[in-house]
Amino acid sequence: MPLNLDLIRSQFPSLAVTDDGKPRIYLDNPGGTQVAQQVIDRMNDYLLHHNANHAGAFRTSIESDAILREAHAAMADMLNAASPDEIIFGANMTTLTFSISRALGRWLKPGDEIVITRLDHDANIAPWLMLAEDRGAVVKWVDVRPEDCTLDMADFESQISERTKIVACGYASNAVGTINDVKAIVEMGHAVGAWVFVDAVQYAPHGAIDAQALDCDFLACSAYKFFGPHAGIMYGKYDLLDRLQAYKVRPAEDKPPHKFETGTQNHEGLAGVLGAVEYLEWLGKSQIPSAKSQTSNSKLQRREAILAGMKAMVEYEQGISERLITGLSKIRGVKVWGVTDLKRLDRRVPTVSFTLEGWHPRAIAEKLAEKNIFVWDGNYYALAIMERLDLQKHGGMVRVGAAHYNTVEEIDRLVEAVSKLD
């Protein structure tokens, strides 16, 4: 079934907001999506009825802990973790990555190797650079193919050796949208006994994730990129999490996931994460005609519903990507970076970045903002790829990031606005 855009957009109250009667076109989604009504309801309900700290004997604390457990279970379903105890919540992906890198550092020796890529967000680069500096490890960089901004997989294989202990890669690029062959990367890392860390922040809003099928050791994402609140999520194989020594206060629990969830968590935010997963579940059920007739005893399982929703989402977003890339590519002076072959759209998410001859990316973003079209400019913390493409000194790129709630008409308005820049 095609996505019902009117129904989907009705789930996002902010999409109805206007400025002086002018609708806002949110194409800034890679930096953070709009929030579903289910998220707002969950957060409001938590703060009004269940707001309390952890492990109390009284009613609101007991209810709060139940909601937090449900949030762990929901994310386990979304990522297909083996257990809710493999899900760690934190302030954001960056903070969680620094935390887990410190813990892994206890197992590193001078001369051990860490493999990272030039396609990644700096949140999946800087923690490993600093860890290498602290532990005397060697950093090895995987290059990209500038013509389509894909990882050079032959170079990837050559960088991995018997001394490799950690391999860090992104699932999808937040700068140019490239989807990486994570399964192959995990297999390469595991072949030499390395741990593999996957940054799935940019991929999570655009495709189903199966942590067990990938067999990665760690995977991180952020709820505010998949229609939820500002919160970070880390998946880790339970055996590894159990053996790692966490940096924590002494009274805190010693078992995963709580030993990594330092201090008091953002409880209302975690309730909102639950709401975000519930939105994805709702999306899937809305795509399955038989779902409405299911009884409470035979309702669709959450994972199955999420997969159905993601499948429909991917199909729609590939169409959006085709329209966006085709439209931008017809404009004189525009260069679209990344995968532009329309037969290879399964290799990218609908994050499309471009440069325009004679224009600074910031100036383009400002001109579009005047028309209530919201896009990003700069390096979006993907510093390494901007340096590799020699764009950092020129202000980076303009990034147009669609989500499944964006319409074809919005894409056309963006393309028209770029074509009329003067």
Image (tube, grey):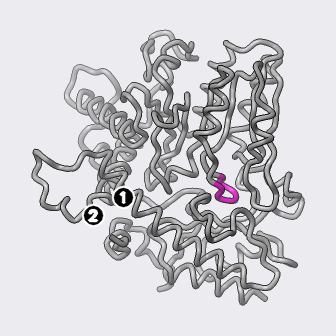
Tag shown at residue 286? 2
Name the one closer to the observer, 306 or 75: 306
Residue assigned mark 1:
309
Q: Is residue 301 left or right of residue 88?
A: left
- Say what amino acid the circle numbered 1 marks: Gly
Q: What is the number of the mark on residue 362? A: none
> Measured along the vertical axis of the image, is residue 153 above or below residue 86?
below
Tell me where residue 195 appears, x and y as whole percent: 63, 25
Quarter of the C terminus within the rendering: bottom right
The span from disc 1 to disc 2 (Cα, nearest Å) is 8 Å
Q: Is residue 240 above or below residue 388?
A: above
The three-letter amino acid code for the residue at tag 2 is Ser
Q: Tell me where residue 395 sits by quadrant.
A: bottom right
**Could you tell me residue 218's position as x and y percent?**
55, 30
Q: Main secondary structure of the magenta part?
A: loop
Give residue 385's position: percent from left, percent from top.
Answer: 79, 52
The residue sitting at 74% across, 70% down in the picture is 336
> Magenta segment: does it hold 174?
yes
* Circles 1 and 2 in contact, beta carbons < 8 Å: yes
Q: Secondary structure at mark 2?
A: helix
Q: Residues within 10 Å of mark 2 (few under 14, many from 20)?
A: many
Percent across and percent down for residue 255 are 43, 15
Per the image, is 268 magenta? Answer: no
| Nearer the observer, 303 or 39 | 303
Report the front residue among 343 and 128: 343
Residue segment shown in magenta: 173-178
Residue plotted at (39% across, 39% down)? 75
Q: Secondary structure at mark 1?
A: helix
Residue at 67% from the left image edge and 13% from the top image edge: 106
